[in-house]
Amino acid sequence: MQVAMLLADHAQAVQGKLYIVGGGWTIIAPGTPSAVAIYIRVPWTQTNTKHTWRLELIDSDGQPVVVPGPVGEQPIVIEGGFEVGRPAGSIPGTEQAVSLAVNYGPLPLAPGGRYEWRLAIDGHPDDDWRLPFSVVALPVQNQPPPEAS
């Protein structure tokens, strides 16, 4: 399978199309909601078959990023499945496509950190299915000096 992935401010997958807002960044401020837009090209021979996908956030040491959960710390992992059929009248050998949009709220990521979303399909990762990004602190806004009395 071939996959294209993009970091965005927001994404939606509607009727096979991806709608992406603010896509293509690699640097984010702490506490900013974001999305991963995923477009999967499925070969003819892998259509009409159930597939699973797993998107995991890891840190710069290759370790899963964990957040507090109801039963202790939990890794940030999103999982799902897809099955794409062969439309009536399609030419044998024609690949099909699947669009996925994964939106997530503010994550507790530290400024100065480097992170990476990694995708695996049917338990198989690929070096091309990675989205690295950095978290940077917002610059402090200059405050006007207090007025003299």
Image (tube, rainbow, N blue to C red):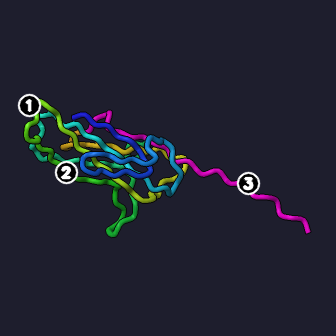
Query: Residue placed at 33% from the left, 69% from the top?
Result: 70
Tell me, yes or no, whether the two marked residues, 2 and 3, touch with CB atoms within 8 Å.
no
Q: Nearer the viewer, residue 54 or 42?
A: 42
- Element under label 2? strand
Q: Looking at the image, is 35 positioned above or below residue 147?
A: above
Query: Residue placed at 37% from the left, 45% from the top?
Result: 117
| Alpha carbon distance from label 2 to label 1 | 24 Å
**Residue 18 relative to residue 124: left or right:** right
- Element under label 3? loop
Find residue 17 and report its image quarter.
top left
Q: Earlier in the sequence, mark 2 or mark 1?
A: 2
Residue 146 part of the magenta-drawn span: yes
Find residue 61 and report its image quarter.
top left
Q: Which residue is mark 2?
A: 81
Name the amino acid type tagged 1.
Pro
- Percent x, y of residue 56: 32, 49
Q: Quadrant of the N terminus?
A: top left
- Percent x, y of residue 139: 64, 50
Point out the stretch of residues depicted in magenta. 125-149
Residue 103 part of the magenta-drawn span: no
Q: Quadrant of the C terminus?
A: bottom right
- Percent x, y of residue 39: 28, 41
Q: Nearer the viewer, residue 68 or 2?
A: 2
Q: Which residue is mark 3?
A: 142
Q: Give the mark toward the camera: 2 or 1.
A: 1
Q: Which residue is mark 1?
A: 92
